[in-house]
Image (cartoon, helix red, strand yellow):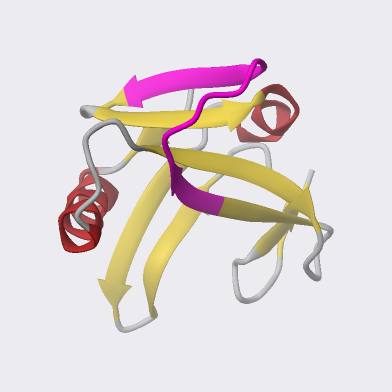
Amino acid sequence: MIFISEEAKSKVDTLKQEAEIGQDYFIRISVVGGGCSGLSYKMDFDNEGQPDDQVFEDRGVKLVTDLKSFLYLCDTTLDYSDGLNGKGFHFVNPNATRTCGCGESFAV
C-alpha cells in the first residue's frame, strides 16, 4: 500500500482546485533512475490508467503506481512540509537504505 499524510492530502486538494482539474485525476507516483543516490521519485496528476497500474486509496486520495515502481514504494507515505527545513512534498520510504542530502533520491 502507498499512504498519504493529512498535510499532503490538504496540499493535493489545494493544487487540484488551483489547476481546476476534475475528480477523475489521481496522483501517479513512479521511481526512475537518477539522482545522486541512484533512484528518484516522480509525481504528477494523471487521469489515464495503464494495464500494470497498482491503485491505492488513502484519506480519499487515489494514488497510482506501476508494478515496477511499487516494488520500491511498498508502505511509503507521501508527506508535505512547509516548515523552515524546506517546503514541498517528500516521501517517507521504509525501503530506502540511503537518501541524498536534499532528499530527492534514494537507494535500496
For the point 25% across and 48% down, the residue is 21
Residue 34: percent from the left, percent from the top?
A: 81, 62
Q: Is residue 47 left or right of residue 16?
A: right
For the point 27% across and 73% down, the residue is 82
For the point 29% across and 30% down, the residue is 24
Q: In this rendering, is residue 58 above or below 18?
A: above
Which segment is the magenta one? 43-57
Q: In this rendering, is residue 38 above or below 35?
A: above
Q: Is residue 74 left or right of residue 46?
A: right
Q: Is residue 97 visible?
A: no
Q: In this rendering, is residue 3 above or below 91?
A: above
Residue 90: percent from the left, percent from the top?
A: 47, 58
Residue 19: percent from the left, percent from the top?
A: 24, 60
For the point 59% across and 67% down, the residue is 103
Magenta stretch, overall SS? strand
In the picture as drawn, the residue positioned furthest to the bottom comes out as: 84
Q: Is residue 106 left or right of residue 56?
A: right
Q: Is residue 58 visible?
A: yes
Q: Is residue 88 left or right of residue 98?
A: left
Q: Is residue 61 magenta?
A: no
